[in-house]
Image (tube, grey):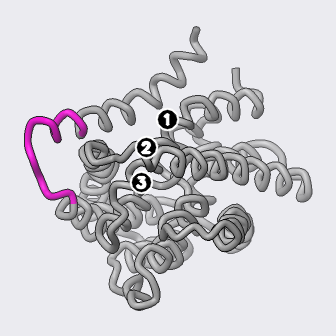
Amino acid sequence: MNYALRILEIVFPVVALFALGFIYGKWRKLDPKVLAEIVLFLLAPAVMFDALARQTIDYRQLTQAVGISLTIHIVPGAVAWLIQKTAGIRSRTFVPCVMIMNAVSLPYPLALLAFGEEGLAQVVLLSIPNIFIIFSIGLYLHAGRTMSGEPFRMPALWASIAGLVIALTGIPMPKFFLTFTHLTGRGMFPVELFTLGYRLRSIRISDLRFSLIVAALRFTLGFSVAWVLSNLLEIEGTLRAGIFLISCSPPAVLNYVFAERYGEEGARAASVVFTGTIFSLITTPLVLLYLGVS
């Protein structure tokens, strides 16, 4: 019973925000592209900078985290690309939704609840490369070749670089500025989840099969890569737990934000992210059981 309540404490806020966005869409209308731009140009930079600037990171830890994180992204992405080419899948959202997982809003509270501050620290460190991947490769895949310079116009990318420099060098930051970024960044998760729920009004039943395939690939490939890595490198403890929590996460909500802003597949991406998140209601407890959490 206690185990079920622990999982519910994490999952319920996510589902509730989806539901509120969906219900609001039945009552009032808004432009989801406006909210997507608020996330990209204000809230995401704040949360990325805040998450990094508060850490103390050494170069050895960073090098290890980069290597692991690149592996758990690139391997599923490469497999998805091969499947796309072989099966003739035309959707631009297919590869990024398999490759780029939710590395923050789900793994962070999971790690803190299940493994304490040490577990949270490992997950934060492993999520650092995800920030750069999603605002470079992820954006490129969603936007296409004609938008190849767009990542360098993304404030979140530069905010991540600034935060990482501060974390590595220990440059002191004014407390009032960190308070500002912390307060602003906390708004990212409810806004993006609410917007996604609003967009669910336009999900087509024809996208369900596509969404289930992506969700299944995201978890299956993620778990497989985490298992191989942890066994091959003989990784134990909270680092092993962090690898599994991030690698087995559902598609990132920012996949939907990018698809909404840069393409015509906002509804399909919303379906993928929503299906993957619901799918994680089953897979997350299984992963925690595998990691020995009771």
Q: Are marks 1 and 3 in contact (CB under 8 Å)?
A: no
Q: Determine whether the residue tagged by mark 1 lies in a helix, strand or loop.
A: helix
Does 154 lie within the magenta span?
Answer: no
Q: Is residue 24 magenta?
A: yes
Instruction: Inspect this view and state whether residue 244 appears.
Output: yes
Q: List the residue tagged with mark 1.
A: 278
Residues at circles 3 and 2 in contact by the CB criterion of under 8 Å: no
Q: Which residue is mark 2?
A: 274
Say which element carries label 2. Answer: helix
* Residue 186 in sight in this render: no
Camera-side mark, 3 or 2:
2
Amino acid on which the number 2 mark rests in the picture: Phe
Q: Which region is colored magenta?
A: 22-32
Q: Residues within 10 Å of mark 3 (few under 14, many from 20)?
A: many
Distance (Cα) linking label 1 and label 3: 13 Å
Point 31% across, 56% down: residue: 185
